Amino acid sequence: IALGTIFPLALGPMLTFELPGRILLQGDLGWMPPAYAGAVAGMISSFGADGNLLGPVVKDALADSFVARVSFGWRPIPHYGFEISGGYTHIAVSGMATPSVVATVLSGDLADKVETKLTESMPVKATLHNFHVAIGWRWLAADDKLVIRFQAGYTQTVGSSSSIEVPEDAEIEKAVQGPFNSQLNTILTNDVKLPLFGLTMGYHI
């Protein structure tokens, strides 16, 4: 049972079971603080092909989002702390996007209509489905009761779903919903590719 961080994804608790054969089953839940969301948006803006569009949309939405991960791993060498793992990461985000930011994801007359006719920020929700892989090392102390684990890894979005609400104008919401969600999901699956660094401290039962 541990607490720690997977940067830049989340802070939170982690539970690891070690089965015979040094097989590892791991689950963790986390909260993404605003600083981590800013780091994610910065990396996407720097390295993603469409990052300049995505960064402003997700920076505020990612903050305070929920992250859940399930991992399957293995310690290949007995009596050593080296580990390899991989699994699924679920990210649920919700936030607000200004008309100018939404317009950057759209095109043509629809983008112009959003930017000129709307004045209020709009709720945006998205669910990101990701895979992750990692290598790491764990250290045991205090009669093997204290476990310190470091991991370095990679995660990438392979699927997503999203929605946007336009409280000011139901007609515009109907027109925007499909194109915005399609383009945002394309950007998410193309550009959310992140290095991961984990550090946890826990108690071995």
Image: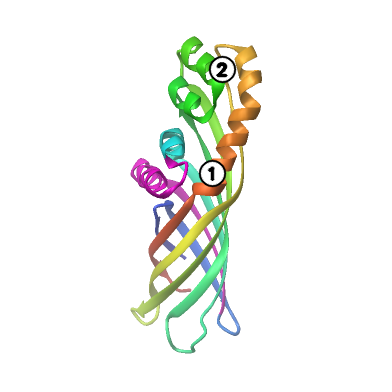
The amino acid marked with disc number 2 is Asp
**What range is drawn magenta here?**
23-51
Q: Residue at x 49, y 89 (%)?
A: 78
Between 132 and 192, the one lying in front of the other is 192
Do the CB atoms of the residues marked 1 and 2 lie less than 8 Å apart? Answer: no
Whether the magenta-drawn stretch holds residue 61 is answered as: no
| Residue 163, horizontal then vertical, whole percent | 60, 31
Rendered image coloring scheme: rainbow
**Left or right side of 18 for 52:** left
User: Circle 1 sits on which residue?
Assistant: 188
Mark 2 or mark 1, which is nearer the start of the sequence?
2
Question: Which mark is drawn over residue 109?
Answer: 2
Name the spot of residue 44 as percent of width and height, x first. Answer: 42, 46
Residue density around tag 1, few if under 14, some if 14–19, many if 20 or more, within 10 Å:
many
Q: Is residue 87 left or right of residue 34?
A: right
Q: Position of residue 184 (x, y in %)?
A: 56, 36
Is residue 194 positioned above or below 45 on the image? Answer: below
Which residue is pictured at 58% across the width and 22% down the height? 165
Q: Is residue 91 visible?
A: no
- Residue drawn at (47%, 28%), measured in percent from left and top? 104
From the viewer's perspective, tell me whether residue 174 is left or right of residue 167.
right
Residue 202 lies in what quarter of the image? Answer: bottom left
**Measured Cα–Cα span from mark 1 to mark 2:** 24 Å
Front-most of residues 69 and 53: 53
- Name the residue at 64% across, 19% down: 175
- Give the SS element for disc 1: helix
**Residue 13 % position (x, y):** 46, 57
Q: Crowding near pointer 2: few (<14 within 10 Å), some, many (20+)?
A: few
